[in-house]
Amino acid sequence: MGTPTPASSGASSEHGPARAGGPPPDDRACAVAHGDVRPESGDRTLVAVFATPVAAHLLRYGADLGYRTFLVDPDEDRDGSAAPPPLDASADVVVTDHHRPELGRVLAAVLTQPVRWVGVMGNPRHPAPHIPALTELGVPSGDIARVHRPIGLNIGSRTPAEIAVATLAGLIADRNGRPGGFAF
């Protein structure tokens, strides 16, 4: 074994040490990707609705991505707050259980706020239970149309962790005006 050498040598910049053969030090995106500078966290909120395994992964990974995270579950016997916090146009809301009887009430409350994105987890081959639940509550069809279903990128996710990764990747792509996938 040889003697360890520093990973980089040469000049440093405000973005961290220069990388031999790498991009110029003023390339902020590259510097962030290499961990040389901290990313701008922005002002992003992620709300997971209903305490489920998917919600647990969304909140954990979402915090790592710089989101302020909240869990909402109207069932007092579960974790989370009973109602969503005041939300603004920086908020992404993900409903992680489409079988809960409170689905319509919770979504109706979310849709009264100017959230950036709202979606309900569910298989696209099955009926979307949020539509009749919201219709029965008198929610206008334009507001119902704001609800995305299914959620996340189509990567064949099956486990709670995979669903959370697909969902967060989809939110990042949408926020950045990108289609997701491998096309650049």
Image (cartoon, rainbow, N blue to C red):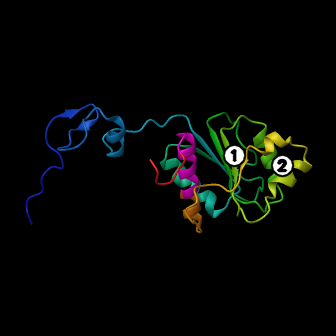
Q: Which of 149 and 37 is in front in this view?
A: 149
Q: What stretch is highlighted in magenta?
A: 166-178
Q: Which residue is most to the left?
A: 2
Residue 68 image label: none
Residue linked to disc 2: 105
User: Residue, x 71% and y 36% (percent of image)?
Assistant: 86
User: Which image quadrant is residue 155 in?
Assistant: bottom right
* Residue 15 image point, x, y percent: 29, 34
Per the image, label 2 sits on a secondary structure element best described as helix
Q: How far apart are marks 1 and 2 (CA)?
A: 14 Å
Tell me if label 1 and label 2 are in contact, CB under 8 Å.
no
User: Which image quadrant is residue 115 in?
Assistant: top right
Residue linked to disc 1: 118
Magenta stretch secondary structure, dominant: helix
Q: Quadrant of the N terminus?
A: bottom left
Mark 1, residues whose alpha carbon is within 10 Å: few (<14), some, or many (≥20)?
A: many
Q: Nearer the viewer, mark 1 or mark 2?
A: 1
